[in-house]
Image (spheres, grey):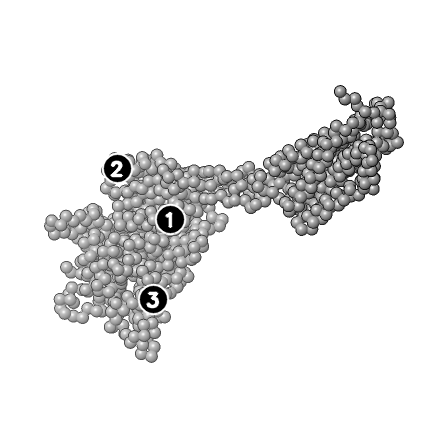
Amino acid sequence: MASNEWSDLSKDGDIVIGGLFSFDVINTEDIYAFKSSPVKSKCTRKHFREFKSARTMIFTLEEINRNKKLLPGVTLGYRIFNACGNQNLLSAAMAAVVGPEEQYKSGEDCIATRVQALIGHSTSGTSGIVSKTIAPFHIPLISHLSTCECLSNRNLYPTFFRTVPSDQFQVKALVELLKHFGWTWVGYIYSAETYAEEGTAEFIKTAKEEGICTEYMLQFFGTASENALLSVVQKIKSSTSKVVLAFMSLTYFNNFLEMTKEMNVTGIQWIGSEAWVSARQLANSGTANILQGAMGFAITESYIPGLADFLLSLQPSDAPESIFTRAFWETVFGCSLSSSSSSVNLKLCSGSEDLRTVTNDYTDMSDSRPVYSIYKAVYAVAHAIHSLLQCHNGKNPTTGERCYNKSDIQPWQVLQHLKTVNFTTFSGDKVYFDKNGNSVPEYDLVNWQIDSKGSVKIVNIGRYDGSLPSGKRFIIKQNVSIMWSGNQEKVPKSVCTESCPPGTRKALNKRRPVCCFDCIQCADGEISNGTDSVNCMKCPGEYWSNDRRDQCILKATEFLSYGDIMGLLLLVFACLGALLALAIFAVFYLSKNTPIVRANNSELSFLLLFSLTLCFLCSLTFIGRPSQWSCMLRHTAFGVTFVLCISCVLGKTIVVLMAFRATLPGSNVMKWFGPPQQRLSVLAFTLIQVLICVLWLTLSPPFPNKNMKYYKDKIILECDVGSAVGFWAVLGYIGLLSLMCFVLAFLARKLPDNFNEAKFITFSMLIFCAVWITFIPAYVSSPGKFTVAVEIFAILASSSGLLFCIFLPKCYIIIFRPNLNSKKHLIGKTISK
């Protein structure tokens, strides 16, 4: 097959670079049943964008040839091949590899006319087939639009390079976009082609890793029946997701729009793949309302000086051998360049036709993205050849091998140097290839903004640079206006479940996708202060969660204070008890010379009343916020005053026993327990308690403690006893004296005397012991401030028992029955029968 059948544009040079494009678009897909020889694909001439890419390649080569610094003394030529359909494209690729058929048959050296590198193709499927075919010849293929991640497989495509990012990076960028706007519940439509199917596989994997869920995944076939298309549209309209990602090539998405524009598919925020998201020709009167607000990532663009003039100044005479240039001109202007019979129905062209007066894909200069990618691809090959031809001291500085001249270079050498290319374009963009032949993964985030007149603006609103560290790759421009679908003012919501507010956590529902979660309120003492928290955090020890569970606040402190009703009541009772003891003291003092006061050891009585007053008052040290001093004071004051009190009662009991023993003939017992011995016994008993308290305070004193065991939401401020041994030693000593007193009083209860004090002491000690025996379980089991209240109650109850049982009967006689307050009555015997 003659190579001239596919070669449409060419120019000789010292080194020739090939281009593979599809100016003609195939009407139907190639279908191979493997039952007969394949037939040539039928094409129509209408793909002006591909022709524009080819012309951009020519412009770039001419610019390089004018550059005195890049490839000085070397002229780059080109051979651009036009074919459609995989069969024809393979034939064109082989024609580029072997060179012109005439030279091949004549045995001439065709190195000078054989391409050293091939630019193209624009589709991933074709690029994959062509790359596999020419790989054995070590000819590099540099694509300007093939984005399929599958082409990064170096085992299958060892000579493939591209100046557009791989779909792997596009998918990552799209997922970053969805995450940025909180779109975790999306619909997904993809076309039945290699580009979309490979991209979809990558999207499924990446979306799952990043927590993006798809409500549905639909495949669109370009030849879908009306029922199949209706099913797709119905699914989109009935779904709860308001964001739909359309991963399709331009041709497929254009067909999709044309087939669905009458079906009222509105209110959808479309996210587009780079293949169509910057193609403004998609917008027309029927599709503008659908595309309003659409966004996606497009390959980077840059204005190329002089390119527009070069493209628009095209004349048929610039490429007289080009069949397509002739057909392009006749199609655009509707005239014939010759009077041949094939153009009998067309008028002759006047020669004044100007491309600046028409609008089509070729003359549209608003989108420079594809042509800039072609521009970088051609420059990459030029820089590789420039590096190959460098020579210093007889060696190539890059490889260290011998030097080569422009007449004997081979494609494998260009391939070798293409891997190390690294240069910066005039606009500041870096161009280099990684180990898989991928270029710098950069995208522009674009937004479709269509006004009421139908004018389309595709505005850059952000950028994605995959070469930057994670977290810095995706940025949205500040102070940029973004238009959403349906002209909404706010970012559309597309979530399966609304974000869990602070104070709750996400809980996965095993029966639904990961994005459809339940929001569970944090437990007591735990918080979450952000939305969509996975876990609740426990508050530190002295903090507790507030009612909303979104903040840790200091726990409320609890102690028995004077402001509490219970504290206030105990204060009143303590004061009343102390006042009553003082009042009785006054009564006794005023009646100190009466028989009833003198007969019951007035000195011990006054000391007992004083100690009871102190007992009532020491209970006040238990009320209020615990401090270091108050904790030490309350327990020691309580222990010492009560021992003083019981010592006095014990002394009075012994006095009663001794007094009646002294009435026996020959008894001299009172000599051994007179007033000095009584005072000494009280002092001795009290000093023992003082010693115990001193040891307790020295070794392990009571201290204020924050008790967080009883309540989760509040702190009990209490006095820790420090040494439990010391605490129970104090109580145990009081109990021992009380028990001794009770036993002695019980023994003396029936001694004959109208005013036998042992009876009252027995009853008072019975109350005293009963109170403190019941105090122990109550003290141990009462929480918080109630522990202190129980202790105060025991102090007040036992003190009151002693006061009332011992002194009230005497006060009654002194005040109300003074006739009984006589020596005669005092020594009178009871008559027992």
Q: Secondary structure at mark 3?
A: loop
**Image marks 2 and 1: residues in contact by CB distance under 8 Å:** no
Residue drawn at point x = 33 percent, y = 43 percent:
188
| Residue picked out by circle 3 | 420
**Image marks 3 and 1: residues in contact by CB distance under 8 Å:** no
Which mark is first along the chain, 1 or 2? 1
Checking the image for residue 209, the label placed there is 1
Give neighbour class at mark 2: few <14, some 14-19, many 20+ (Cα, 10 Å). few
- Which is more foreground, mark 3 or mark 1? 1
Q: Residue furthest left?
A: 36
> Residue flagged by tag 2: what amino acid is it?
Ala
Q: Position of residue 286 (x, y in %)?
A: 33, 39
**Image marks 3 and 2: residues in contact by CB distance under 8 Å:** no
Q: CA distance from mark 3 to mark 2?
A: 49 Å
Q: CA distance from mark 3 to mark 1?
A: 33 Å
> Residue flagged by tag 1: what amino acid is it?
Glu
> Residue flagged by tag 3: what amino acid is it?
Thr
Q: Position of residue 435 (x, y in %)?
A: 32, 62
**Quarter placement of the C terminus:** top right
Dividing the picture into quadrants, the one containing residue 600 is top right
Q: Secondary structure at mark 2?
A: helix
| Residue 206 placement, left or right of 674 | left
Q: Secondary structure at mark 1?
A: helix
**Quarter placement of the N terminus:** bottom left
Give neighbour class at mark 1: few <14, some 14-19, many 20+ (Cα, 10 Å). few
Dividing the picture into quadrants, the one containing residue 144 is bottom left
| Residue 122 placement, left or right of 669 | left
Q: Position of residue 387 (x, y in %)?
A: 33, 70
Q: Is residue 734 visible?
A: yes
| Residue picked out by circle 2 | 228
In this orientation, which residue lies closer to the viewer: 386 or 77? 386
| Residue 226 placement, left or right of 292 | left
